[in-house]
């Protein structure tokens, strides 16, 4: 992905490959899937604090609109579209235009504070950093709408080889996989309790 600073987790511990990725993939488990990750697993306050710190370090303006858009996305436990965000930010007598939200989302995406889920035309917050050019894999559950994020070095390596053979230079390396998450599959596999009269 573009515009990302080196990631904070796993740096310098010697456990990853040359790009700082864990040897067997790096999974983040968001909302309802057991831990912290993109898509709402981080506290909104932590996401805002991280964005403020990184904008200051990078010499960028973290405007009120950018902060409010990030707060709206971080507060949700599912991907949000620009119009949903604008609606949440609007108040009686104070309408927020979707075009303004899109401008803020462009900035937030470039800085790695949110990720765009293309298949949903929606956004999820990110509370950690990724290495420059890191390939991301989003596992999208069709049942509960949950999204898990991970890096997959084996997939990235295979993709690197394919791209090198074609001379193609990607501007983004994001893979979206749709299906059913383990939690939903587990609920589907649970036996139904018989009715008691």
Image: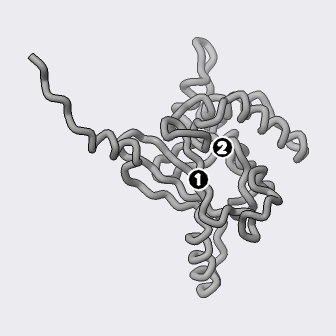
Which image quarter: residue 12?
Answer: bottom right
Q: Which mark is residue 101?
A: none
- Find the residue positioned furthest to the bottom: 165
The percent position of residue 188, horizontal first and vertical second, equals 28, 42
User: Mark 1 Cα within 10 Å, few/some/many (few <14, many 20+)?
Assistant: some
**Colouring:** one colour
The quarter of the picture where residue 100 lies is: top right
Quadrant (top left, top right, bottom left, bottom right) of the C terminus: top left
Q: Is residue 76 placed above or below 140 in the rendered structure?
A: above
Residue 39 place in picture, x, y as percent: 57, 41
Q: Is residue 12 above or below residue 149?
A: below
- The percent coordinates of residue 105 (x first, y second) are 66, 42
Where, quadrant-wise, is the N terminus in this rendering?
bottom right
Question: For the residue carrying disc 2, how many other residues have a C-alpha within 10 Å: few (<14), some (14-19), or many (20+)?
Answer: many
**Residue located farthest toward the left when viewing the structure as drawn:** 197
Which residue is at 73% across, 32% downward?
Answer: 46
Residue at the (77%, 28%) spot, across then down:
64
* Residue position for label 2: 126
**Residue 69, visible in the rendered structure:** no
User: Is 58 placed left or right of 24 in the picture?
Assistant: right
Q: Earlier in the sequence, mark 1 or mark 2?
A: 1
For residue 27, which numbered disc appears in the image?
A: 1
On screen, residue 4 versus residue 75, left or right, reads right
Mark 2 element type: loop
* Residue located 50% across and 45% down the image: 147
* Quarter of the rendering containing residue 184: top left
């Amino acid at each position: 992905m573009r515009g990302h600073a080196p990631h904070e987790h796993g740096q310098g511990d010697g456990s990853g490959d040359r790009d700082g990725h864990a040897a067997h993939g790096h999974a983040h488990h968001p909302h309802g899937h057991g831990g912290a990750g993109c898509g709402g697993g981080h506290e909104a306050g932590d996401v805002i604090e991280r964005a403020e710190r990184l904008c200051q370090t990078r010499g960028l303006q973290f405007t009120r609109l950018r902060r409010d858009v990030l707060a709206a996305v971080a507060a949700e436990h599912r991907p949000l579209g620009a119009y949903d965000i604008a609606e949440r930010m609007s108040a009686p007598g104070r309408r927020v235009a979707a075009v303004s939200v899109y401008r803020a989302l462009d900035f937030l995406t470039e800085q790695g504070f949110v990720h765009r889920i293309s298949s949903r035309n929606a956004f999820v917050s990110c509370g950690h950093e990724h290495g420059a050019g890191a390939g991301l894999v989003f596992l999208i559950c069709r049942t509960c709408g949950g999204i898990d994020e991970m890096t997959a070095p084996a997939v990235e390596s295979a993709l690197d080889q394919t791209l090198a053979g074609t001379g193609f230079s990607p501007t983004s390396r994001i893979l979206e996989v749709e299906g059913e998450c383990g939690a939903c599959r587990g609920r589907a596999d649970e036996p139904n309790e018989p009715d008691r009269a």
